[in-house]
Amino acid sequence: MIPKIESNDIGFTGLWSNASQLECGTLFLNPKLADDLFFNKLTNMTCTSEKMIAESVEKFQKNHSTPYIYSLNYPELESNLKSKGFVYHDTQHVLKKRTLPSRKPNAIKITPDSISSWTQIFCEAYDCPEWAEPVSVILKNSISSAEYYVDESSSSCMALYEKNSILGLYCLGTIPSRRKQGSAASLIDFASHEVNSRNLDFLMLETYERDNLSKFYSNLGFESIYGKNIFTI
């Protein structure tokens, strides 16, 4: 199950960032999304190659990005990173949801003509107005591979990416002034019904420990599957 989930993550990230396959890991970089630890990362590590780590750091620096390296249950890699001056930064928790809400709320699917509305909500939710132009370009280029939605009140946004019989939910965000009004939860409920109607295995999403949203997702029926430790220098 974990390889399928990781493949879903890598597939979606590749729509937003440039992917390069290194010796035994996948490097994602998008210098236009400055220092974002999801879209700029070295992940899918299968060895502890010091040469590859040095190469990745060089590539991060050339793109003016902070190096973020993800470790999935790999103590040897983490020990090696620490010996090279890396420090623990955060943990990304991977969650899944199988329960089906009683009612399917409505959601508005973004089309090429309405990309700007999704971009506006996303950039306001994540406080990154300087990303508006590159995010709009990303949506234009990826809208045939991923689905983008907003709720009926245009308060929250999300992206859905289907792969390996898993529906990945990404980029969930709500405009700050409209939080705690149920708009993000309604999008999650919509996505849960999509899992059911498409006969997929489950809905998955990822959240960072620093965001302190684990209780919020648990209350919505998500359960933690595993975590990835993130190191930086």
Image (cartoon, rainbow, N blue to C red):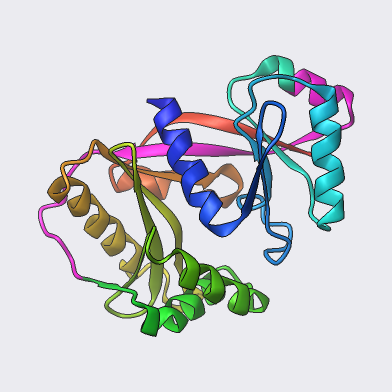
Q: Residue at x 52, y 42 (%)?
A: 10
Q: Is residue 100 magenta?
A: yes
Q: Residue at x 70, y 67 (%)?
A: 32
Residue 112 lies, in percent from the top left, at 38, 79
Residue 82 lies, in percent from the top left, at 83, 25
Q: For the N terminus, give its image quadrant.
A: top left
Q: Is residue 98 magenta?
A: yes
- Residue 158, quarter of the rendered image: bottom left
Residue 231 lies, in percent from the top left, at 74, 36
Q: Is residue 157 visible?
A: yes
Q: Which residues are magenta?
A: 78-106
Q: Nearer the viewer, residue 168 or 134?
A: 134
| 219 with respect to 91 (left or right) | left
- Residue 233, compared with residue 71, is above or below; it is below
Q: Nearer the viewer, residue 180 or 31?
A: 31
Q: Residue at x 58, y 26 (%)?
A: 72
| 90 with respect to 141 (left or right) | right
Q: For the C terminus, give its image quadrant.
A: top right
| 73 with respect to 32 (left or right) | left
| 219 with respect to 58 (left or right) | left
Residue 31 lies, in percent from the top left, at 73, 61
- Residue 57, quarter of the rendered image: top right
Q: Is residue 213 visible?
A: no
